[in-house]
Amino acid sequence: MPAETVLQLLPTAAVLVDADDRVRLANGAALGMGIVHGTSIAVAELAQLVRAARRTSTTRVLELSLDSGGFPRRTLAVGARAQPLEDGEVALVVDDLTESRRVEAVRRDFVANVGHEIKTPVGALTLLTEAALGAGDDPDAVHHFLTRMQHEAQRLSRLVQELLDLSRLQGGEAPAETVDVAVDDVVEEAVDRARNAAEAKHIDIVRGGDSGLVVSGKESQLVTALCNLLDNAVAYSSEGTQIAVGVHARDQAVEIAVKDQGVGIADVDQERIFERFYRVDPARSRATGGTGLGLAIAKHIVSNHGGEIAVWSRPGAGSTFTIRLPAEAP
């Protein structure tokens, strides 16, 4: 097999540059990253890296961020290695490190957030148990401590259950035994589950849009995804506001949007809002009983159903979370 063919099969971006800084060979990955344009290296930092490797006759490495271009736009974290060859030629290899960096960030959030979430209810249960044992002659105090113990136990149970749910969903496989699911039923059930928490804060949940739409999947999972969005909307909205759930058919897809009048989300947080254990406001999440897993679970459910989930938000202007699923003929 010719060397050029082997080079094209590599998932890693590879470029061969001659002594005059002209690109002699570039594989598909390099073109896809936007590293090469015509016969030139399009990224200034990489061009400088190649020249430095040639000038010093040593291997040079660099990590940098690249704009992937296209739509939707995203930033790639890459690692580059320039290796000088004979006659002034330089081989440039660029690896996409975006996913590994994302995994590292998730791991850090796991240690920082989930470790604390587990430790907090366990420590509280220990203290409350000691307090209840010391208040044996005061029934009212014992009842108070037992009520608090029940709350902390439920919080710990919810965290463990969501971890188990997320573990089952992360395989990326479509739900087994999918059936036609009426979107109206999904919305009705999710709204019903969120109603008690909303009424406690005097928040109205209103519904609108198209009816009679059908998607393929597992109804219980879709209800969970939508319910997680509604729970977040309620938790981060002020008392006396309104949450709107809209359903629309667009371009052979069904869109379910949840719009709130809450505190909103900054742009920097929107990039990571669907990651496991990432929370915009950890202190407020603990106060509302949040685990940092609800949006991650919703994203996995929607993805496993062949759809996508997106967010629009501005601080102080509320947020709109939109689930987009392939439509089925009713």
Image: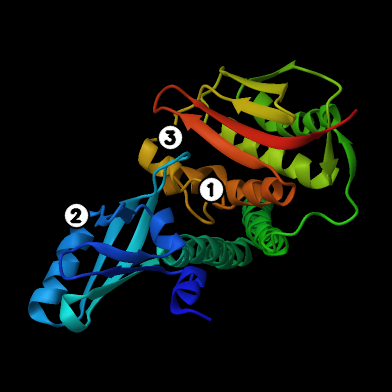
- Using the image as rendered, state which of residue 207 and residue 14 is in the foreground: 14
Dividing the picture into quadrants, the one containing residue 195 is top right
Q: Position of residue 131 (x, y in %)?
A: 56, 62
**Horizontally, is 222 left or right of 314 in the view?**
right
Q: Do the residues under discs 3 and 1 have CB atoms within 8 angstroms?
A: no
- The percent coordinates of residue 237 (x first, y second) are 53, 27
| Circle count | 3
Q: Which residue is mark 2?
A: 44
Question: Where does label 3 land, which residue?
Answer: 265
Residue 36 appears left or right of 111: left
Look at 46% across and 67% down and name the residue there. 107
Looking at the rendered structure, the kind of residue marked 2 is Ala
Is residue 266 or residue 309 the one in the foreground? 309
Residue 7 makes an appearance in the image: yes
Q: Nearer the viewer, mark 2 or mark 1?
A: 2
Q: Secondary structure at mark 1?
A: loop
Q: Earlier in the sequence, mark 2 or mark 3?
A: 2
Specify which label sits upstream in the sequence, 3 or 1: 3
Q: How is the image coloured?
A: rainbow
